[in-house]
Every structure is written in structure tokens, then in C-alpha cells.
Amino acid sequence: QKEVEQDPGPLSVPEGAIVSLNCTYSNSAFQYFMWYRQYSRKGPELLMYTYSSGNKEDGRFTAQVDKSSKYISLFIRDSQPSDSATYLCAITDKLIFGTGTRLQVFP
Amino acid sequence: DAGVTQSPTHLIKTRGQQVTLRCSPISGHKSVSWYQQVLGQGPQFIFQYYEKEERGRGNFPDRFSARQFPNYSSELNVNALLLGDSALYLCASSLGTGGGGQPQHFGDGTRLSIL
């Protein structure tokens, strides 16, 4: 079993939609979770950083951690074409990344 | 403030050659990590250095080596290049080792192509 699992997509949504991106992880001891956005031919850009269970909001982005289910989510409200990118979840306790979900937001 | 800078941006090598990739961390960051990202996959951890000492190593062969300099910049060396080494090599810096969950900030990578 992989330590982090992420649906590779692609996920295609219309502009203005709410997007839900998800990862599951295997080790309940993991504590630190991050979401990165990666545009084509660029490095990953840190979006959200969370610790422990609960929600964290930053503008149109909300990161959610459910430690009981070992499940992390990133929600994007009012999605824009500029949000089209690959979204990577990461467990920074062990520097492990998911495979990334490719998101396309069409006008 | 300058982010993480990597050089060169793109490199073409042939099988069996050796390559050196360079990284300058964000000012004030003492930790540098290296990752390999193959197309369609997430970054795979190669090395982490903190205060010039190796603090972690991923599942990569001994052909891969790295070091960190007193100014916290770093080099990744890969010997005896194979076709499978073709990838985007990413450098990330953080304030600490990352073991405490400190966020890592990435450069735009070096795209290595092996012919």
C-alpha cells in the first residue's frame, strides 16, 4: 500500500464550480500536511499547510484534515481558469508526495 | 526576496555521463532537499541536507550524491547517467529539517534529458 494515494484525474470543471481534491494516507502518525499547486514546467508552489484535524481557510482555498479517516482534502471555491494546474498533496513528516491531480477549469 | 534558484534550467546529456545540478535556497533557509519528478508523477525524495549534514536519503542508487556548502547552497551529482534518469530535478528549501513539518519552498527545477 502506498503511503499517500491521490487520484491523478484529470478533473475538468466549469468556471465558478467548487472543486474537491483528495488524498488518503496510510500512517496515522503523520501530522503535517500540505497542498502544492504546480503549473506546467514550473516547480510546486505551496498553497496550504495544515497540522492536526480540522479546517484551514485562505481566500478561495480550504484545506481539511480528517485524521480518523486518514483523509485530507483541498476545496477551491469559485474556480477560475487560472486554477488549471496539477495539485499535489504532501506529508511533510516524511517528505512524501502524492502523484498529483490534474485540474482543468474551462470558461 | 529571491526564491529558490536552480541552475541550469535545462540540460541534455548522454548515457554514461555525469551531471551536477545547483541550488540556492531562500535567504535564511538552512535546509535543502532534492527531488526527482518524472512526468505524470509526484516528486520523489532523494536527499535532505541541513547545516551541511545529510539528514535523509530516499530510495535512490549510489550514483546519486549531494552536498551542502557553508552558504547553504547545494549540489546534486548523478554519475553514470541512465535513460531513466530523465526527469525534472527539484530543489526545495526550508528553515529547518522539515521533520517538524516546516513548509518547503521549491525552485522551478532543472529538466534533465538523457539521450
Image (cartoon, rainbow, N blue to C red):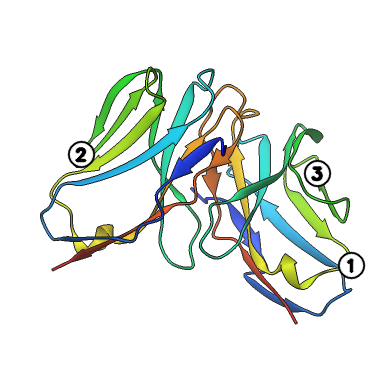
Question: Which picture quadrant has residue A70?
Answer: top left
Image quarter in which the C terminus of chain B is found: bottom right
Q: What residue type is labelled 2?
A: Gly
Describe the element under mark 1 as helix, strand or loop: loop
Q: Which of A62 and B102 is in front in this view?
A: A62
Q: Which mark identifies residue B104?
A: none
Residue B99: x and y, percent? Answer: 62, 25
Residue at the image position 50 percent from the left and 19 percent from the top:
A28
Residue B94 as seen in the image, left or right of residue B23: left
Amino acid type indicated by mark 3: Phe
- Given residues A99 and A79, the one toward you in this image is A99
Instruction: List the residue tagged with mark 1.
Output: B80
Structural distance between the alpha carbons of marks 2 and 1: 47 Å
Q: Is mark 3 on a helix, strand or loop?
A: loop
Q: How crowded is mark 1: few (under 14 residues within 10 Å), some or many (20 or more)?
A: few
- Distance from disc 3 to disc 1, alpha carbons, whole Å, reads 24 Å
As drawn, A69 above or below A25: above
Image side of residue A16 versus residue B98, left or right: left
Q: Determine whether B32 is above or below A8 in the image.
A: above
Kindly identify which residue carries mark 2. Answer: A59
Q: Which mark is residue B69?
A: 3
- Residue B100, x across and y down, in percent: 57, 21
What's the residue at 67%, 36% (across, down)?
A: B31
Q: Determine the chain carrying the residue at label 1.
A: B
Q: Residue at left 33%, top 61%?
A: A10
Q: Residues within 10 Å of mark 3 (few under 14, many from 20)?
A: few
In the rendered structure, which disc, 3 or 1, sits on the residue that comes first in sequence?
Answer: 3
Q: Quadrant of residue B10?
A: bottom right
Observer-nearest of B39 and B67 = B39
Kindly identify the amino acid type of the residue bearing the numbered disc 1: Ala
| Same chain, labels 3 and 1 | yes
